[in-house]
Image (spheres, coloured by chain):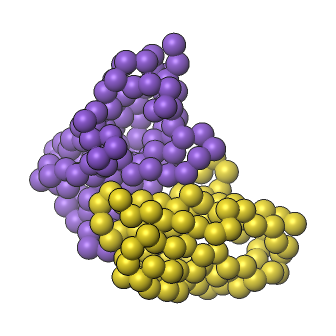
Chain colours: A purple, B yellow
């Protein structure tokens, strides 16, 4: 059983950088990919990107130029940075574990609401 | 990107009803199709992976089928706790995309 605990700033101004961290408890850190997914208020889910335990990353082309995902294997932490935020980046951000191979998100964090407002 | 289209977008049903939600992919994704349930204010919960594999702890009234481009999620006998929003997601190729969601409401 994997437990994901996430945190980060919830209110940002336009042009600032969103920073979130996800701590992974339980399970096999090296056995999963670690993803970030977001959900604007009242809307659907958008995959942001993923990282594996060796630091290999893959991001959604729609956000790739602004996204950095990193991993600290000494702490089992995964982090997301999203630069130059605008109101369109207002969303609940989730970290989630993904099973390699079948590419399914099996465990999710509780989510962090990030609001971008001047 | 592979587009995932769910139908209907919303559905009203009663406790005890049988309902089916359809998910269509813009290209063949084999059986790399997963279903999630999301309650209000909650994170999504994985129900079914690989089109038809029920996850541990998920009631057997949930079932999934399909391959290629067309998939279905069936709830055989609706319970009060099943009224939620359901999403499909393709794991065939990156970027991994979700359907727009189907909101299941009590009639």
Location of the N terminus of chain B by quadrant is: bottom left
Q: Where is residue A104 in the image (x, y as percent from the top left)?
A: 38, 68
Please tell me whether residue B64 is drawn above or below residue A67 in the rendered image.
Answer: below
Task: Give the quadrant of residue B74.
Answer: bottom right
State the residue at coordinates (22%, 52%): A58
Q: Where is residue A17 in the image (x, y as percent from the top left)?
A: 34, 23
Q: Position of residue B32 (x, y in %)?
A: 38, 76
Please tell me whether residue B48 is drawn above or below residue A13 in the rendered image.
Answer: below
Q: Can residue B99 be seen in this view?
A: yes
Q: Nearer the viewer, residue A12 or A27?
A: A12
Find the residue positioned furthest to the front: B26
Location of the C terminus of chain B by quadrant is: bottom right
Tally of numbered discs: 0
Q: Nearer the viewer, residue B106 or A110?
A: B106
State the residue at coordinates (32%, 71%): B92
Q: Nearer the viewer, residue B85 or B100?
A: B100
Q: In this view, does A104 lie to the left or right of A71?
A: right
Find the residue positioned furthest to the top: A118
Q: Position of residue A46 (x, y in %)?
A: 44, 50
Q: Nearer the viewer, residue B104 or B25?
A: B25
State the residue at coordinates (57%, 80%): B72
Q: Is residue A65 left or right of residue B75?
A: left
State the residue at coordinates (37%, 76%): B29
């Amino acid at each position: 059983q994997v437990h994901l605990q996430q945190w980060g700033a919830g209110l940002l101004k336009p042009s600032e950088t969103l920073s979130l961290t996800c701590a992974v408890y339980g399970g096999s850190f090296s056995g999963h990919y670690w993803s970030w997914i977001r959900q604007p208020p009242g809307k659907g889910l958008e995959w942001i990107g993923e990282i594996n335990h060796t630091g290999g990353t893959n991001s959604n082309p729609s956000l790739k130029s602004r996204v950095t995902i990193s991993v600290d294997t000494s702490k089992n932490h995964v982090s997301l940075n999203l630069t130059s935020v605008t109101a369109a980046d207002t969303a609940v951000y989730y970290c989630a574990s993904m099973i390699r191979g079948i590419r399914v998100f099996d465990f999710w964090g509780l989510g962090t609401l990030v609001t971008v407002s001047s | 990107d592979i587009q995932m289209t769910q139908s209907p977008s919303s559905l009203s049903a009663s406790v005890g009803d049988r309902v089916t939600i359809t998910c269509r992919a813009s290209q063949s994704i084999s059986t790399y199709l997963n279903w999630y349930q999301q309650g209000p204010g909650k994170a999504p919960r994985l129900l079914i992976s690989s089109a038809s594999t029920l996850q541990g702890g998920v009631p057997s009234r949930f079932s999934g089928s399909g391959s290629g481009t067309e998939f279905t999620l069936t709830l055989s006998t609706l319970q009060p706790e099943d009224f939620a929003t359901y999403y499909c997601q393709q794991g065939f190729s990156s970027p991994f995309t979700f359907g727009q969601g189907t909101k299941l409401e009590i009639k």
